[in-house]
């Protein structure tokens, strides 16, 4: 049985990439709501309704675990997904990222960069404070990073200047850890490392894959590999212009088996 991974668009493929590396035996079904992206500007009710449809689609694929790859979905609809999933392990980028940040920080001062909706939801700060009420959290919305990453400007002067501007308030304080709270940001790691060499970067794709590995092990759900090579299936609600190029950049390998489906 596969792991179900879903996102508002292509960005969640950074999570698929991390899962493929961490759990190379596992089958994966991915759904990206490319027809309705971005979720970052939509209301809570709409995001919850879309998410319920996606979870329904995942359950039709008989998934054994769910990974909420989208920070925006995790921020506003994570609890609904858990209600629907029952006993099935549900991992999400915010829980995993918050925990990894707390493990990484030495001075309990954590920076979070994310989309506007994720920052406004305060979900990272809430999750961090649930574990450690004394931690200081400084969140900065970096909306321009999503289009810059999709444009492929990963090492471009414009992106560098944008990063410098966004990171200013974080660098002015003494945060020692920075959570990359959006599916797109792991692609900016090399640039961010150069611009903020003093910050430990927390890549929520990697930390979610690690959490998924632990959860599957705990529930006795790890695939032993006897069924042959893993099967990867990618479903999207639209195949937009440049989907293949952008998707492959996120996935880090060729993107095959992509099928279009309509939900709802
Ligand atoms: N996948 C979204 C996130 O991680 O917040 C970014 C894309 C979007 O919906 N705006």
Image (cartoon, helix red, strand yellow):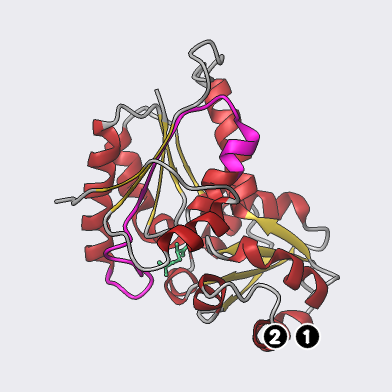
Ligand 1 neighbours mark 2 (CB distance < 8 Å) = no
Q: Where is residue 258 in the image (x, y as percent from the top left)?
A: 36, 46
Residue found at x 64% / y 47%: 206
| Crowd band around label 1 with a 10 angstrom C-alpha radius: few (<14), some (14–19), many (20+) | few
Instruction: Check contact, mark 2 vs mark 1: CB within 8 A.
Output: yes
Residue linked to disc 1:
172
Residue found at x 49% / y 19%: 221
Tell me if I can see residue 106 in this picture.
Answer: yes
Q: What element carries label 1?
A: helix
Residue linked to disc 2:
169
In this picture, which residue range is highlighted in magenta? 18-43
Residue found at x 18% / y 51%: 262
Residue found at x 36% / y 68%: 241
Q: Position of residue 220 (x, y in %)?
A: 52, 16
Question: Does the magenta-highlighted stretch encompass residue 24?
Answer: yes
- Residue projecting furthest to the left: 264
Q: Position of residue 122 (x, y in %)?
A: 48, 68
Ligand 1 neighbours mark 1 (CB distance < 8 Å) = no
């Amino acid at each position: 049985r596969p792991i179900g991974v879903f996102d508002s668009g292509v960005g969640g493929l950074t999570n698929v990439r991390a899962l493929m590396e961490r759990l190379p035996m596992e089958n994966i079904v991915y759904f990206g709501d490319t027809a309705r992206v971005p979720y970052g500007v939509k209301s809570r009710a709409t995001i919850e309704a879309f998410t319920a449809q996606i979870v329904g689609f995942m359950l039709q694929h008989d998934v054994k675990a769910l990974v909420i790859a989208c920070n925006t979905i995790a921020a506003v609809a994570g609890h609904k997904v858990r209600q629907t999933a029952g006993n099935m392990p549900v991992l999400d980028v915010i829980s995993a990222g918050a925990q990894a940040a707390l493990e990484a920080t030495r001075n309990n001062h954590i920076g979070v960069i994310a989309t506007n909706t994720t920052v406004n939801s305060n979900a990272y700060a809430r999750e961090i404070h649930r574990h450690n009420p004394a931690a200081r959290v400084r969140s900065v919305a970096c909306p321009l990073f999503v289009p810059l990453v999709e444009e492929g400007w990963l090492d471009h002067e414009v992106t560098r200047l944008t990063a410098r501007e966004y990171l200013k308030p974080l660098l002015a304080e003494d945060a020692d850890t920075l959570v990359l709270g959006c599916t797109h940001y792991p692609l900016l790691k090399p640039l961010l490392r150069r611009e903020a060499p003093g910050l430990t970067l927390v890549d929520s794709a990697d930390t979610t894959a690690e959490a998924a590995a632990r959860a599957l092990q705990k529930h006795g759900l790890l695939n032993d590999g006897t069924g042959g090579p893993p099967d990867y299936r990618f479903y999207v609600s639209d195949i937009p212009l440049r989907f293949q190029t952008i998707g492959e950049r996120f996935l880090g390998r060729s993107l095959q088996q992509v099928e279009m489906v309509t939900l709802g």
